[in-house]
């Protein structure tokens, strides 16, 4: 089995809403360190946890998680 890498916007969504890692962890029923591991891409969530995270933020799952890096905000295809 190869290395499965996923990308996410959990930290960005938390920052936008002023939510701490501990608050998110409490809402999801996980340890606050798990949120840190998720944000850094050191841990990929189960489908159930991924769905709960997207539901918590009220956004579609593809807004939170991706198999590919998210484009930088404000970046255009030819900006450099």
Image (cartoon, grey):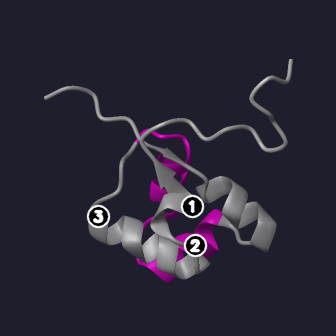
Magenta stretch containing residue 26, yes or no? yes
Q: Is residue 31 left or right of residue 15?
A: left
Q: CA distance from mark 3 to mark 2?
A: 17 Å
First reached walking from the N terminus: tag 3 or tag 2? 2
Specify start and end residues of the magenta stretch as a single range. Answer: 21-42
Q: x, y percentage for residue 69?
A: 55, 36
Mark 1 element type: helix
Circle 3 sits on which residue? 47
Camera-side residue of 17 and 24: 17
Question: Looking at the image, is mark 2 or mark 1 earlier in the sequence?
Answer: 2
- Which label number is shown at residue 63? 1
* Residue bearing mark 2: 24
Q: Is residue 78 left or right of residue 26?
A: right
Residue at x-position 60% and y-position 58%:
10
Q: Disc 2 and disc 1: Cα gap in Å?
A: 17 Å
x and y percent of residue 65 in the render? 48, 54
Q: Main secondary structure of the magenta part?
A: helix
Q: Position of residue 73 (x, y in %)?
A: 79, 44
Q: Residue at x 80, y 34 (%)?
A: 76
Residue lying furthest left in this view?
Answer: 1
How far apart marks 1 and 3 lie (CA) works out to: 15 Å
**50 w.r.t. 4: above or below:** below
Image height check: is 66 above or below 14?
Answer: above
Q: Is residue 7 above or below residue 18?
A: above
Where's the C terminus, which quadrant? top right
Task: Please identify the residue farthest to the top as the structure is shown.
Answer: 80
Closer to viewer: mark 2 or mark 1: 1
For discs 1 and 3, the disc positioned in front in the rendered view: 1
Q: Earlier in the sequence, mark 1 or mark 3?
A: 3
Do the numbered discs 2 and 1 sit on residues whose CB atoms are within 8 Å? no
Q: Residue 45 is drawn in which quadrant?
A: bottom left
């Amino acid at each position: 089995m190869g290395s499965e890498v996923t990308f996410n916007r959990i930290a960005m969504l938390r920052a936008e809403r002023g939510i701490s890692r501990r608050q998110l962890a409490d809402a999801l029923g996980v340890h606050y360190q798990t949120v840190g591991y998720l944000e850094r891409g050191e841990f990929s969530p189960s489908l159930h946890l991924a769905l709960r995270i997207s539901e918590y933020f009220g956004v579609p799952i593809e807004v939170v998680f991706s198999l590919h890096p998210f484009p930088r905000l404000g970046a255009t295809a030819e900006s450099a």
